[in-house]
Amino acid sequence: MTPTPETPRLLIVDDEEIALRNLERVMKKAGYQVTTSSSGARALALIESGEFDLLLSDLRMEGVDGMQLLKACRARHPDIEVIMITGFATTESAVKAMKEGAFNYIAKPFRLDEVRRVVSEALEKIALRRENRRLKQQIMEQAESYEGQVRIITQNPEMRRLLQVAEQIAPSDCNVLIEGASGTGKELLARYVHRHSRRSGGPYVAVNCGALNADLLANELFGHEREAYTGASSARRGLIESASGGTLFLDEVTEMPAEMQVKLLRVIQEREVLRVGATRPLAVDIRVIAASNRVLSEAVAQGQLRRDLYYRLNVVGLHIPPLAQRAGDIPLLIQHFGGDAKHRLLHAHRVLVEEVVD
């Protein structure tokens, strides 16, 4: 089978030559693009490139072992799925690998049909995740693009007043805090503010604070210097730097770990960011829009959001009413999406969730 750009790309790592070649032969026969390495250190450099969909690695190896490769994948390319293979099949090592984010765990001596099955399941998960992203992007493109502006469809008086306030505060650089139940369109409103601001020509960068653990969130937000940790063979700018000159949207901000809240507060106060492993900060020019499906004052009272960070973010507060209180908008939304587009939205991600307004 001739590989195509869509053919899944596998990286197989094992310091046992026979096992490595058997896995390579079987995976190539199954139609995958396969790269092999008998060295964990060399595999780290390959992972840095991010050109793989799946890592199939022996757990116990000299020098850099499978757990280090797994952690490197989680830190640098969390979309890469990892399957661990080992001859030391203990419950403890299996649990540890799964806690670190491994997709599955296979014990030696393994059956090749079992490996094929687990690899197929991991690739199905990857394909589903990519399809979900594609559908979400399609929804956002349909929802947002209208002569360069975000479209918001509503006839509800409360929503119209909310949009008027959003347009009034958009030209300023003040931080904004958006509250609303899950699915009410908080990110869409954030994009609306960005598009009506003087920063509309700059980047808009969105981060879901609840989707990443503390270490990964730090790396994503602040970036890192070369050799800041094992596998960091080159420097990488974080999302805060990437948003400089534009808007940084922090979704579910109450889910951000406490230590990260302190670092974010410094970024907002000092207008500078310190990469992981760096000694000198970099100046950044960002506007922060944060959102939560919780009542933020309650989150502050319960100690889940720092009070000083809350006041820094809540320069202007916007609250989106749920669709249940805007029944008159439902026919407009159905008419807007219409036909096939409506069915795609219903099938994809919480259709009336991304509440777009005209």
Image (tube, rainbow, N blue to C red):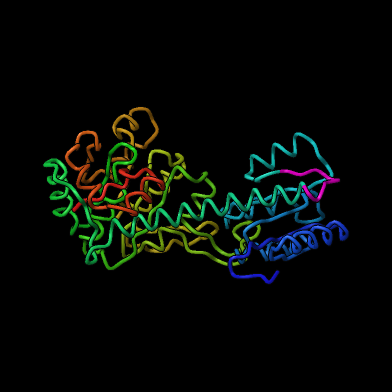
Part of the protein shown in magenta: 105-113
Q: Nearer the viewer, residue 350 or 321?
A: 350
Q: Residue 97's spot in the image, x, y percent? A: 69, 42
Q: Is residue 202 left or right of residue 227?
A: left
Q: Residue at 34% x, 64% y: name it.
A: 203
Question: Along the horizontal axis of the image, is 11 left or right of 207?
Answer: right
Image-quadrant location for residue 181:
top left
Could you say where residue 175 lies in the image, as x and y percent from the top left? Answer: 26, 50
Q: Does residue 202 lie above or below 215 as drawn? A: below
Give residue 350's position: percent from left, percent from top. 37, 43
Q: Position of residue 346 (x, y in %)?
A: 36, 45
In terms of depth relative to the viewer, which is nearer, 19 or 90?
A: 19
Q: Nearer the viewer, residue 106 or 166?
A: 106
The answer to whether residue 80 is magenta is: no
Residue 325 lies left or right of residue 233; in this view the side is left
Residue drawn at the location 84% of the way across and 59% of the way down:
22
| Foreground of the two, 218 or 103 | 103
Identify the residue shown where x is 77% and y is 63%. Answer: 37
Which image quarter: residue 205? bottom left
Q: Quadrant of residue 63?
A: bottom right
Q: Quadrant of the N terminus?
A: bottom right
**Residue for point 36% across, 49% down:** 343
- Which residue is outermost to the right? 18
